[in-house]
Image: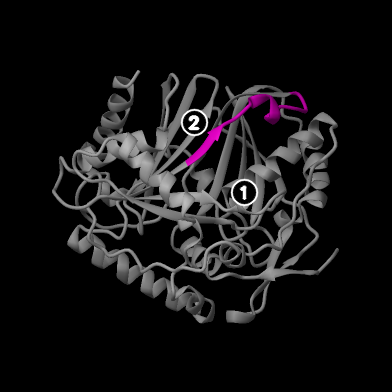
């Protein structure tokens, strides 16, 4: 077993650790549905082999405050089998097994579930403090290569988000003010639970992120008037040639959707920001978080959440993350043949609405996570119908 130092715990990852204790599991949960068989022995052997080539899935934490760092525990992710034959796979209802916490400090921040039922499901669960969504997919790609007996590509896990961002962008940006309306209106009641639902649309959609952003802004403005700001996660890896990494290397850009804006307007703004390197902009106070105890971060996050719920205004209206279109053949092997791919947003009440888009063939999966206090009275279902109806009109 190795105990090599891998990288420091970044400010972003420290915040994710705090959110993981407030909204467990706060994980990337990537699903492949399909048919065939799930042989646990084959999967454990494949995961062990893939973990050697992708040590970022074996990380554990050591140290405290600004001296906290990731080390290689040498222990591959666990592979667990569960029965999900009674679960629809379309919502958080009836899926308590997806709420099981992950524990990065002792080195149990990643796991793979083999979910027996019809269809079969495989889910890669990675705590967001350990890696981001692209890192999760990188790990999954090599596990499936191992299942097919193909050479593994591998990845590193030493690159740090802030260093990569500063390699192409020296500018910073102020924190987004809490003046933006929410898609489903004001919070009602109390509680900290999150809900998610999944639906599908068929067809070919150009500029899907921009289309969903405009549909969401229109739905928000049926509830109240005010500014709409959409956060869009951007993978920073393309900023460095040949970089394959499981580190947290995703940063946000923000798009303001004004009344009357078309999806072409929104797409143009996204392209302009990427050309100007806005995906590398950091907040001036980011580094301070590295020196904060997790308990203080939780207090500050809780204070912001309560204030925003009370005012009905948020720092960001929604997050929209696009995972792109996948070739399902890349995620088949060991007797399992994938027929669908989707993922659950690692939601928290800091954002009133989080969307993940995932495509394959002629299908786009749309998965939405929101706080329970903003889903009352059928508002969640109405927003889903509005987005689906808006997209269908474009076909």
Q: Nearer the viewer, residue 198 or 240?
A: 240
- Residue at the image position 40 percent from the left and 45 percent from the top: 270
If the image is split into quadrants, where does the N terminus sit? bottom right
Q: Which residues are magenta?
A: 322-335
Relative image position of residue 180 (x, y in whole percent):
24, 56
The residue located at (69%, 69%) in the rendering is 7
Number of dots carrying numbers: 2
Give the number of the disc on residue 87: 2
Left or right: where does residue 348 sit relative to residue 105?
Answer: left
Q: Would residue 54 be found to the left or right of residue 372 on screen?
A: right
Badge 1, how many Cα within 10 Å: few under 14, some, many 20+?
few
- In the image, residue 107 lies at what x, y percent? 69, 62
Q: Of helix, strand and loop, which one carries label 1?
A: helix
Residue 319 in magenta stretch: no
Q: Nearer the viewer, mark 2 or mark 1?
A: 1
Q: Secondary structure at mark 2?
A: loop
Q: Of the residues under marks 2 and 1, which one precedes in the sequence?
A: 2
Question: Vertically, is 340 above or below 347?
Answer: above
Quadrant for the C terminus, please: top left
Magenta span contains residue 327? yes
Rendered location of residue 275, percent (x, y): 48, 50
Residue where numbered disc 1 is placed: 238
Name the residue rendered at 60%, 64% in the picture. 167
Mark number, residue 333:
none
Please tell me whether residue 231 is drawn above or below residue 220 in the rendered image.
Answer: below
The percent coordinates of residue 301 (x first, y second) are 37, 69
Label 2 packing within 10 angstroms: few (<14), some (14-19), many (20+): some
Asked if residue 210 is positioned above or below residue 392 in the image, the reply reads: below
Can residue 148 be seen? yes
């Amino acid at each position: 077993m190795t105990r090599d130092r891998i990288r420091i715990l970044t400010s972003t990852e420290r915040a994710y650790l705090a959110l993981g204790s407030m909204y467990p599991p706060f994980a990337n949960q990537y699903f492949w549905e399909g048919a065939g068989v799930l042989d646990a022995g084959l999967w454990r052997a494949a995961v062990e082999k893939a973990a050697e080539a992708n040590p970022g899935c074996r990380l554990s934490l050591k140290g405290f405050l600004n001296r906290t760092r990731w080390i290689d525990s040498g222990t591959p992710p666990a592979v667990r089998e569960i029965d999900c034959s009674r679960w629809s796979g379309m919502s958080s209802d009836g899926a308590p097994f997806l709420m099981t916490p992950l524990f990065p400090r002792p080195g149990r921040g990643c796991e793979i579930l083999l979910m027996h039922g019809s269809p079969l499901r495989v889910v890669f669960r990675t705590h967001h403090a350990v890696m981001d969504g692209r890192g999760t997919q990188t790990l999954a790609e090599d596990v499936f290569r191992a299942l097919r007996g193909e050479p593994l590509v591998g990845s590193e896990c030493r690159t740090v988000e802030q260093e990569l961002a500063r390699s192409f962008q020296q500018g910073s940006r102020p924190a987004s003010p809490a003046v933006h309306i929410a898609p489903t209106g004001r919070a009602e009641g109390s509680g900290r639970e999150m809900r998610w639902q999944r639906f599908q649309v068929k067809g070919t959609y150009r500029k899907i992120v921009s289309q969903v952003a405009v549909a969401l802004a229109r739905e928000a403005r049926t509830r109240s008037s005010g500014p709409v700001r959409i956060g869009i996660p951007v993978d920073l890896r393309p900023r460095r040639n040949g970089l394959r990494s499981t580190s947290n290397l995703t940063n946000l850009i923000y798009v303001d959707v004004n009344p009357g804006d078309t999806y072409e307007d929104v797409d143009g703004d996204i392209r302009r920001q990427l050309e100007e390197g806005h995906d590398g902009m950091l907040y001036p106070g980011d580094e301070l978080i590295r020196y904060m105890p997790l308990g203080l971060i939780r207090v500050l996050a809780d204070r912001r959440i309560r204030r925003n719920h009370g005012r009905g205004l948020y720092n960001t209206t929604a997050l929209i993350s696009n995972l792109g279109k996948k070739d399902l053949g890349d995620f088949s092997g060991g007797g399992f043949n994938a027929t669908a791919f989707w993922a659950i947003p690692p939601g928290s009440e800091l954002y009133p609405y989080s969307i993940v888009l995932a495509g394959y063939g002629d299908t786009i999966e749309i998965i939405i996570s929101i706080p329970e206090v903003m889903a009352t009275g059928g508002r969640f279902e109405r927003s889903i119908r509005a987005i689906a109806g808006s997209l269908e009109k474009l076909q």
